[in-house]
Image: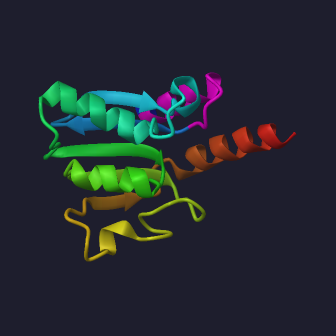
């Protein structure tokens, strides 16, 4: 999770919402990414989507079976669906997102009967650091 936090800090330095993500398999980091929606002018360039894309390239597969994903914020509906489609084994996330999350908030995607694959979910990893980074970032935007 420390590396995901580093990716979030790097995203913040680029002016992006500070969210970071890594994909790990067998103890090896396959990919790491932070948000790049502004930089790439791409609303799908969330940390999770970018990390999943790179991990797929590394493995030569669209299926990331046996992989674990660590992200600093509860995934949104788009990212939660991408995690499901990629067949991620375990999802670890930091701060919950009551407004935009789709795992333990909002649509509860993995509880939906239309969800093809639900990863094991572990929340609250580095939650304090993740939440504080986001709060500071958005406070600065409002000032």
Residue 8 in magenta stretch: yes
Q: Position of residue 73 (x, y in %)?
A: 50, 49
Residue at figure coordinates x 20%, y 62% from the top left: 117
Residue 111 location (% of width, % of height): 32, 74
Task: Identify the residue shown where x is 39% and y is 41%.
Answer: 48
Where does the image place residue 72, in percent across and percent down from the top left?
A: 48, 45
- Relative to 108, does residue 93 appear above or below in the rendering? above
Q: Nearer the viewer, residue 4 or 65?
A: 65
In the image, residue 89 lies in the stretch drawn in magenta: no
> Which residue is nearer to you in this view: 104 or 81?
81
Query: Residue at horizontal 56%, vertical 45%?
Result: 130
- Residue 28: x and y, percent? 21, 29
Residue farthest to the bottom, as pictured: 113
Q: Which residues are magenta?
A: 4-18
For the stretch drawn in magenta, what is the main secondary structure?
A: helix
User: Where is 117 relative to 135, above or below?
Assistant: below
Position of the N terminus, as image quadrant, is top left
Q: Let me know if residue 91 appears in the view.
A: no
Q: Residue at x 58, y 36 (%)?
A: 18
Q: Quadrant of the C terminus?
A: top right
Residue 18 lies left or right of residue 120; in this view the side is right
The answer to whether residue 43 is visible is: yes
Question: Farthest front residue?
Answer: 41
């Amino acid at each position: 999770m420390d590396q995901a936090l580093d990716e979030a800090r790097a995203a913040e330095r680029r002016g992006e919402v500070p969210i970071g993500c890594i994909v790990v398999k067998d103890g090896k980091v396959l990919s790491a990414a932070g948000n790049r929606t502004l930089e790439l002018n791409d609303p799908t360039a969330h940390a999770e989507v970018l990390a999943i894309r790179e991990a797929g390239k590394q493995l030569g597969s669209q299926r990331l079976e046996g992989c674990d994903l660590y992200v600093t914020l509860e995934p949104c509906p788009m990212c939660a669906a991408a995690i499901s489609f990629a067949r991620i084994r375990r999802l670890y996330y930091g701060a919950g997102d009551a407004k935009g999350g789709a795992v333990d908030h909002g649509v509860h995607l993995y509880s939906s009967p239309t969800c093809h694959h639900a990863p094991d979910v572990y929340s609250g990893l580095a939650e304090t650091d993740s939440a504080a980074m986001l709060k500071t970032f958005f406070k600065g935007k409002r000032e």
